[in-house]
Amino acid sequence: MTSRYRVEYALKTHRRDEFIEWIKGLLVVPFVLHAGPTVNEMKTVEISRARYAEIFRDVEQLIRDKSLPHLSRLRSLVPSIGTFFTELPLERAFLEQDPKRAISARRLVSPSFNDIRLILNTAQAMALADGEHPLKLVTFDGDVTLYDDGMSLLKDDPVVARLIKLLSRNLYVGIVTAAGYPDKSGANYIVRLKGLVDAIQESTDLTSDQKNNVYVMGGESNYLFRLKGSEAELEWISPRDWTISEVTKWQESDMCELLDTAQSVLSHSRAHMNLQSSTLIVRKERGVGLVPREGHVICREVLEEVVLTAQRRLEATAVAGRVSFSAFNGGHDVWVDIGDKRLGVLSLRRYLGAIEGDQALHVGDQFASVGANDFKARMAACTVWIASPKETVDIMDELVEYLG
Ligand code: IMP
Ligand code: MG
């Protein structure tokens, strides 16, 4: 039984995606109208499927509407809607997902957040495969997307074979992670990505050029490395070569001030919420985190309270108008980093040679509008929102299938 607390918690605005909730609201009407006991089960399924498909077709049409953004009907219906880099074949994606999730066959459980999230993902994969411009870059978040939280990639992880498949199609693969390690050897990243690095080095299917097409963007948008596939080493790339003009303007003193403020907010929360004995403050060159001490866990509610407090406090500072930052709940810890994944993905797009937004895909797990760090990648690329490494594998298989 879902507790009242859980229901209320899920309804909090920072955990909701307005577009998905809006679609859910549209689908609940046919669900309610066809939810009762039926004499002809098959007929009811057919009617529900046709009604749901029609709704997805209509939403697809609203996305296709290319009128000026401020006149867009979709924007008036869903004010927080962002930019779509491609059209989305939602009806086709629904018909693909429906048999897998028995959406039309369900009489007691209405189309859910996850049903819609996965339909949107499938539609995005279809659109990228059929797009006007060829897909060139696929970036991945690390924790929860490629590997379980805090873990590393192993050679036998199913996602490794899929990443190699993307490389064999001459696509660039990027890992755009919050984990920030300034060390130019890239040793920390090699540890996390070991299974992939070894598999690429040993691969007999990839050409040497293809083996060099993996990039790591660490600390959201702070450190760039290229994998030298045959040597299993990361090569540090000077920020001079890839930093976009928007970021070059940032002053070192502003970045320091922002991190100092973030650190004082985190320290205050730590004292205020009795976290002294169970947590540490970790300060890095481009980030500051509140992390649990070994053997301790910070509960979800506290993590969210800390991240929302940090976001709110930092937004109110003048320096936040001059430097971008990401405040997010990493599942076990809370971090405030200089930079964000929009800048991370955008820098990679530019560095790799004028890759357009409709030629790039970012795969991540953190797309809530506050307290999450993949969210901002939506402004730089097409995105799919996964909830586990297993879902990453599933959507990559779909993508490769549609690419043909
Ligand atoms: P991501 O999911 O790949 O973006 O990685 C997020 C996780 O990386 C966080 O939850 C932290 O546990 C870890 N991490 C390690 N160093 C940093 C840092 O400098 N900034 C933010 N997160 C970090
Ligand atoms: Mg993640």
Image (spheres, rainbow, N blue to C red):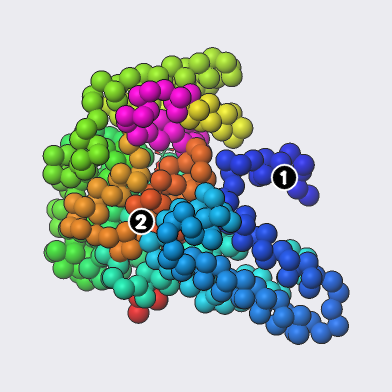
**Looking at numbered disc 1 in the image, what kind of residue is underneath it?**
Val
Mark 2 element type: loop
Could you say where residue 333 lies in the image, as x and y percent from the top left?
48, 32
Q: Which residue is mark 2?
A: 381
Residue in view at x 51 percent, y 39 percent: 370
Measuring from the top left, give residue 17's x and y in whole percent: 56, 50
| Disc with the residue nearer the chain's start (1 vs 2) | 1
**Residue 182: within the magenta?**
no
247 up-or-down from 48: above or below? above
| Circle 2 crowding by C-alpha within 10 Å: few under 14, some 14–19, many from 20 | many
- Secondary element type, mark 1: helix
Give residue 177's quadrant in the image: top left
Q: Taking 149 as reference, is 400 above or below it? A: below
Instruction: Indicate the position of residue 365 as horizontal and vertical percent values.
Output: 47, 50
Q: Is residue 188 visible?
A: no
Magenta extent: 313-336
Residue 349 occupies quadrant: bottom left
- Type of residue at label 2? Ala
Label of residue 149 in the image: none
Look at mark 1 in the image and give the residue it sits on: 7
In this rendering, is residue 185 above or below 399? above
Q: Nearer the viewer, residue 324 or 9?
A: 324
Residue in the image at 54% along x and 14% along y: 271
Quadrant the C terminus occupies? bottom left
